């Protein structure tokens, strides 16, 4: 979490500084290429880092083979993207994209060199070392971009910033990770892990398309203005959610993989990590729902208030999404990558149908459809995901019930304040502070009044204070 907070601070600093040194056209050129590299990046890892983390008895020969496979795939992707650079320039009608695409294609081979070193650190839960590498890379990228931007390198400042960030992170992963690759071995026995990685890649590929379909449909049928409001609302909402969910999930995955042969311990751990994630994420999204208008006005200005209704509707989905997202981690930690891919396809089909139906009513319709489909498939998806695991659907609903009830009660109490006349007399900052304060008080009072609420509150506070998620 500390690493995530520092990374966010660096991203904000980068945005604030570089926005004053570079033009929108410079960012636009990089965005055009990143749209291509983001899709190609799905195949860089091949799911082999997850396979290395999940594998119970991973030998050095096996991980070395995974390392060489990652490097081979990174090299192939670099060659393909570089060869396609003239097509990218032709498609966008921007000749300068040829060299930019070639330069950014090297991020694939650079990143692939550190994939297994990073996986080893995750497997051994050495998150401090991994954080040092990631943060150092971000700082190196920021310094490089700012330095070159000051010397009028324009969009090349961003290109070299991305490359320097990747090189720095990979070099430090090599230094800080205990993994040292050996030569490729024919008899290492990695076929099972290749199948595991293939299923993970299939899930990510399907997930990529359905997560971008809403933007495609809104842009196609309702234009750039509607898409701009929708994408801005989605990005702002997911920013804090990702910051909370990422660190907890990163620790929970290797921990649950270790507990696979201890069904009772696995079940207890899942329930506790689910409760912890619900305890933190549910009140946050509930508060964002009730305070959407002043938050949007403060962050973006009054001209962006059209984002607020979308922001609130998307918060309905975000209320359940972080804890529901643990479904995938259950399947991966239990080694069921085939069912993981099946679940990805089923989920993508359901969400895609919802988007196609909802887009008839614009971005509001898409946001409503997204919420409806997520809650509709929740229980059936739990039955599917938990089928061959020690878990039951009650192991999901019981841990989240307390935070969910307390959050909903806090929403209704805060809503009374939102509608009060005196709140409109305050400036935006004081309005948000007042709403936030009343929400927090209501949430904690309700939590304490619930059965076992006080003990749950103390345990979550202790875990968040110590950061000991691996021993939940």
Image (tube, helix red, strand yellow):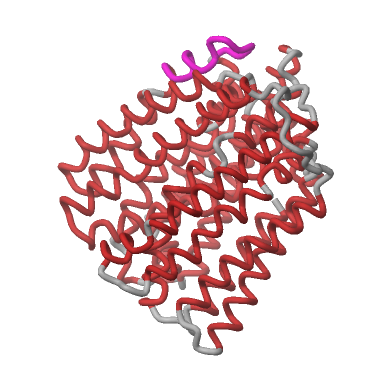
Q: Which residue extends farthest right?
A: 178
Q: Quadrant of residue 304?
A: bottom left
Residue at 35% from the left image edge and 40% from the top image edge = 209
Residue 203, image x, y percentages: 46, 31
Q: Classify 217 as above or below 293.
A: above
Q: Quadrant of residue 326?
A: top right
Choose between 469 and 257: the one closer to the eye: 257
Choose between 201 and 434: the one closer to the eye: 201
- Position of 160 with respect to 308 (left or right) is right
Residue 126, image x, y percentages: 80, 44
- Position of 26 with respect to 390 (left or right) is left
The answer to whether residue 417 is seen in the rendering is no
Choose between 40 and 268: the one closer to the eye: 40
The answer to whether residue 339 is seen in the rendering is yes
Residue 325, image x, y percentages: 52, 33
Residue at 32% from the left image edge and 64% from the top image edge = 305
- Position of 40 with respect to 247 (left or right) is left
Report the quarter where the C terminus lies: top right
Q: Which residues are magenta?
A: 380-392
Residue at 58% from the left image edge and 71% from the top image edge = 161
Residue 87, image x, y percentages: 31, 60
Q: Classify 141 as above or below 366.
A: below
Q: Classify 61 as above or below 243.
A: above
Is 384 included in the stretch rendered in magenta?
A: yes
Is 304 included in the stretch rendered in magenta?
A: no
Residue at 37% from the left image edge and 57% from the top image edge = 84
- Position of 139 with respect to 205 (left or right) is right
């Amino acid at each position: 979490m500390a690493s995530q907070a520092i990374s966010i601070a660096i991203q904000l600093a980068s945005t604030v500084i570089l926005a004053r040194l570079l033009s929108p056209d410079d960012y636009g050129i990089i965005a055009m290429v990143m749209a291509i590299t983001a899709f190609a990046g799905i195949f860089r890892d091949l799911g082999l880092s997850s396979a290395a983390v999940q594998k119970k008895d991973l030998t050095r020969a096996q991980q070395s083979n995974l390392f060489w496979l990652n490097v081979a795939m990174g090299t192939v992707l670099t060659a393909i993207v570089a060869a396609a650079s003239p097509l990218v320039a032709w498609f966008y009608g921007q000749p300068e994209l040829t060299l930019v695409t070639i330069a950014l294609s090297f991020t694939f081979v650079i990143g692939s060199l550190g994939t297994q070193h990073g996986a080893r650190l995750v497997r051994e839960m050495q998150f401090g070392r991994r954080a040092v590498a990631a943060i150092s890379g971000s700082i190196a990228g920021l310094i490089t971009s700012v330095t070159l931007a000051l010397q009028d390198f324009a969009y090349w400042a961003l290109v070299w910033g991305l490359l320097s960030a990747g090189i720095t992170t990979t070099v430090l992963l090599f230094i800080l990770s205990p993994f040292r690759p050996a030569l490729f071995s024919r008899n290492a026995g990695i076929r099972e892990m290749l199948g595991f990685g293939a299923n993970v890649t299939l899930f990510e590929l399907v997930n990529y398309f359905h997560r971008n379909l809403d933007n495609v449909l809104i842009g196609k049928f309702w234009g750039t203005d509607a898409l701009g409001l929708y994408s801005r609302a989605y990005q702002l909402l997911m920013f804090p959610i990702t910051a909370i969910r990422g660190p907890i999930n990163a620790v929970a995955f290797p921990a649950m993989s270790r507990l696979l042969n201890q069904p009772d311990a696995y079940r207890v751990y899942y329930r506790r990590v689910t409760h912890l994630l619900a305890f933190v994420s549910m009140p946050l999204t509930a508060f964002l729902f009730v305070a959407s208008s002043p938050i949007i006005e403060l962050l973006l200005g009054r001209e962006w208030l059209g984002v607020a209704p979308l922001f609130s509707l998307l918060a309905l989905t975000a209320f359940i999404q972080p804890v529901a997202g643990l479904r995938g981690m259950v399947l991966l930690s239990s080694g069921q990558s085939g069912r993981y891919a099946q679940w990805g396809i089923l989920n993508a089909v359901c969400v895609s149908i919802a988007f196609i139906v909802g887009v008839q009513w614009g971005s509001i319709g898409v946001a409503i459809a997204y919420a409806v489909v997520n809650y509709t498939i929740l229980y059936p998806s739990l039955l599917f995901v938990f089928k061959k695991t020690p878990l039951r659907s009650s192991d999901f609903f019981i841990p989240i019930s307390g935070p969910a009830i307390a959050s909903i009660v806090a929403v209704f109490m805060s809503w009374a304040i939102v509608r009060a006349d005196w709140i409109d007399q305050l400036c935006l900052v004081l309005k948000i502070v007042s709403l936030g304060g009343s929400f927090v008080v209501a949430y904690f009072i309700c939590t304490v009044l619930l059965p076992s609420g006080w003990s749950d509150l103390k345990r979550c506070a202790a875990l968040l204070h110590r950061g000991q998620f691996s021993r939940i």
